[in-house]
Image (spheres, rainbow, N blue to C red):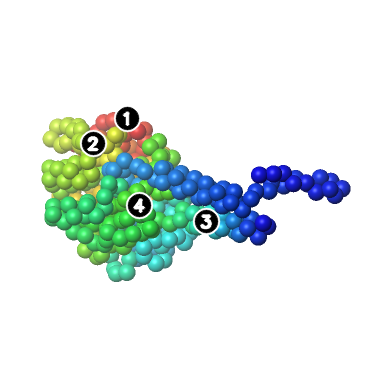
Amino acid sequence: MKSVRIAALALLVLVMAFLAACESGGIGVGLPASGARWGSGGSGPDVFVGGGPVY
Amino acid sequence: MRFASTSHNRERWELVLPPRMWVAALVVVILTFATTSGAASKVVPGTFVWHDLVTDNPAAAKKFYSELFGWTFEPGKGVEPDYTIIRQHGVPVGGIVVPKQQTSPQWLSYVVVADVDRAVDALRQAGGQVYRGPINARPDLRVAAVADPQGAPIGLASRGPSDGVSEALPDVNRWLWMDYVAKDEAPALQFYTQALGYQSQAEARDTATYYRLTNGRPRAGLFKTPWPRETSIWLPYIRVADPDASAKRAQELGGLIVQAPAPRVRNGSLAIVLDPGGAPIGLQKYPFQAGGTP
């Protein structure tokens, strides 16, 4: 009986540790050099549309 | 189930369950965890859920972003090795990827789609390019890194983070918004309304139009780039308290101001900077008084 309880608790700890480890994961896919970039430097034209975020 | 007691000096009670009950309890706990995490991760397609900075100089990026936003960094699990998780006040806000090959540093923002594989097929047919995937970043997380038909990189993900995605206004120094800065806005609008199921609301002023992309609620914006030399790109925004101060600080830290706050630009509530590697980010005060001119 006691060994069953210990085994169950150990398994529970392992599952929780696995789930906790999953939380520290992101995605982390790289991009090739051909990926477009923006910002060739220098100041912008001081022109921008309105709009923007809405919450 | 029964309660057992010992007859020593003081009585001790312990919960004694038969083995089958322990197994049943364990199953319940596991299912509860699985159900909870799954429910929290279900988000509406078209929602941006993650941001990875792809850079071959992670040390410079960490210094810049820690000084500017107070972000902290720790090793994490990603598709590429040497992945870093970014946290703000302990909350994961993104990652840093060191690519296998030299690249142009930039933020790759991930949007949830109903089916990553189908989305990739549709993107190919529309003239887009697939950089990576679809692959399983984790057993229950399918992702792809692609470029849309105008060449703008974007990530596709099958779900959001395990701890869910808040619809509430984010805190200062966290991701606030996404704008698609389009070389050619009409086909871009057509592509994203089809690919991500957005509805668009146009806000026209003078000769320019800002398209707010909604799916249940506003998710992003789209407008024609005022920088004719630039390519189309998804521009991620960080919420800041003072865009002018943040932009100047970014410059002190090795960044470059490409759009300083100005009365004509959303009433001075927005700055756009490049980090030391050249990745653009918007620094947006929110709330702000609507205005400015196109």
Marks 4 and 3, Cα distance to the nearest angstrom? 28 Å
Is the same chain shared between marks 4 and 3?
Answer: no
Label 4: chain?
Answer: B
Query: Closer to us: mark 1 or mark 2?
Result: 2
Q: Residues within 10 Å of mark 4 (few under 14, many from 20)?
A: many
Marks 2 and 3, Cα distance to the nearest angstrom? 43 Å
Kindly identify which residue carries mark 3: A15
Kindly identify which residue carries mark 2: B212
Answer whether residue A25 is visible to the viewer in this image: yes
Query: Closer to us: mark 2 or mark 3?
Result: 3
What's the residue type where badge 1 is placed? Gln
Q: Residues within 10 Å of mark 3 (few under 14, many from 20)?
A: some
Upstream in sequence: badge 4 or badge 1: 4
The answer to the question of whether label 2 and label 3 lie on touching residues, with beta carbons closer than 8 A, is: no
Query: Dot 4: what SS?
Result: strand
Marks 4 and 1, Cα distance to the nearest angstrom? 27 Å
Residue B207 is left or right of residue A30, and the answer is left
What's the residue type where badge 4 is placed? His
The answer to the question of whether label 4 and label 1 lie on touching residues, with beta carbons closer than 8 A, is: no
Upstream in sequence: badge 2 or badge 4: 4
Query: Dot 1: what SS?
Result: loop
The spot of residue B213 in percent (x, y) is 24, 38
